[in-house]
Amino acid sequence: MNASILQRQFEKIGARASVRDDRSRNARVGVAIDIDRDDEGEFFDIAIGRDAPEELAVVDVQPRLRHLLLLSRQRDEKHKFLCGHDERHWFVAAVPERAAASNVRTAFEALKPPAVRNELLRQKVKPKNRNRRRNEAFLRQGEWFFVPIGEHSFPELHILRNEPLRRGTGKPHMCEELVREGGELVYVSAQYPAGLTEPQYHRLLSRRPKLRNLQWIPQRRNPGVFVRGRVRHADHKTIVLHGWHQVLMNTETQAVAMRHVAFID
């Protein structure tokens, strides 16, 4: 791979890219992509670790949109990453492999969950508006899509105020009003941030009773989430949802290539 060629492709969308070898003890296998910052601002940090990819190339550049599609190929595996600018900051998103995205436009589509794509069709949203942050089908803030559900009400006791909405350990999106319905009960602690199902939780404590002293918090995994009112985030413009909206996350977590992305919103 030619680092200078990659850097020139990123320059076409107004971005800087650092392509470097990473031979540290904690280096990832293949490639790791992060958003870093120096005195000149943000830049894409592309670290080539152990078992470097055979090919790392930009397959599509859209300067007007300030986005490009990056391909990493290692033997029979191909992974793609949508790199671009969203509102105030640069970002990188792993594209699900099964989508076979070939350019920036199809990468955008691959990152939309099925319910969002269905709503776009139902609302007959024009192609030129499908990737806007606001159209007839949804509003988007970062990786979250908000789809209106029409006239609907929830019991007052179920409505949480100023509730965080987050993926993993990323900075939360703060919701003025939020309701969670259904989902699977899990127990979460600092040592088990992904959560344990109830059977897993009880098996663990039966084997290691001292872990009862951890600060366990019961939460719901994959619940239906609905929000209304203001949604705030440090890196995004505040949006206001008039009426209840279903919350849907983009499909990035379905990508095997997610393991190569260090940046979390």
Image (spheres, rainbow, N blue to C red):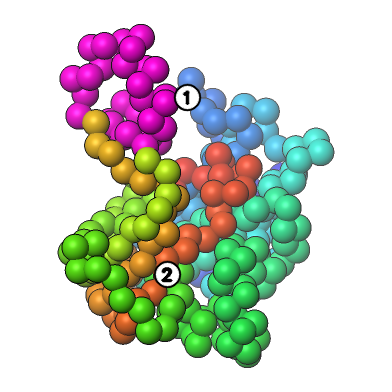
Q: Which mark is residue 26?
A: 1
Q: Which residues are magenta?
A: 186-215
- The amino acid on which the numbered mark 1 sits, given as a three-letter code, is Asn
Relative to 116, say whether 120 is above or below.
Answer: below
> Quick one: 23 or 222, which is closer to the camera?
222
Q: Which residue is mark 2?
A: 246
Comparing marks 1 and 2, which lies closer to the viewer? 2
Q: What's the residue at 55%, 54% (across, down)?
A: 252
Question: Residue sitting at 38 percent across and 30 percent down?
Answer: 198
Asked if residue 151 is among those painted magenta in the image, a careful observer would answer: no
Front residue of 130 and 209: 209
Above/below status of 186 relative to 180: above
Q: Secondary structure at mark 1?
A: loop
Tell me the quarter of the image containing the N terminus. top right
- Tell me the residue at 28%/39% (across/down): 218
Quick one: label 1 or label 2, which is nearer the N terminus?
1
Query: Which quadrant, please, contains the C terminus?
Result: bottom left
Q: Residue at x 55, y 39 (%)?
A: 259
Query: In the image, what residue type sits under mark 2?
Result: Gln
Local packing at callout 1 (Cα closer than 10 Å; few below 14, some 14-19, many 20+) is few
User: Which mark is drawn over residue 192?
Assistant: none
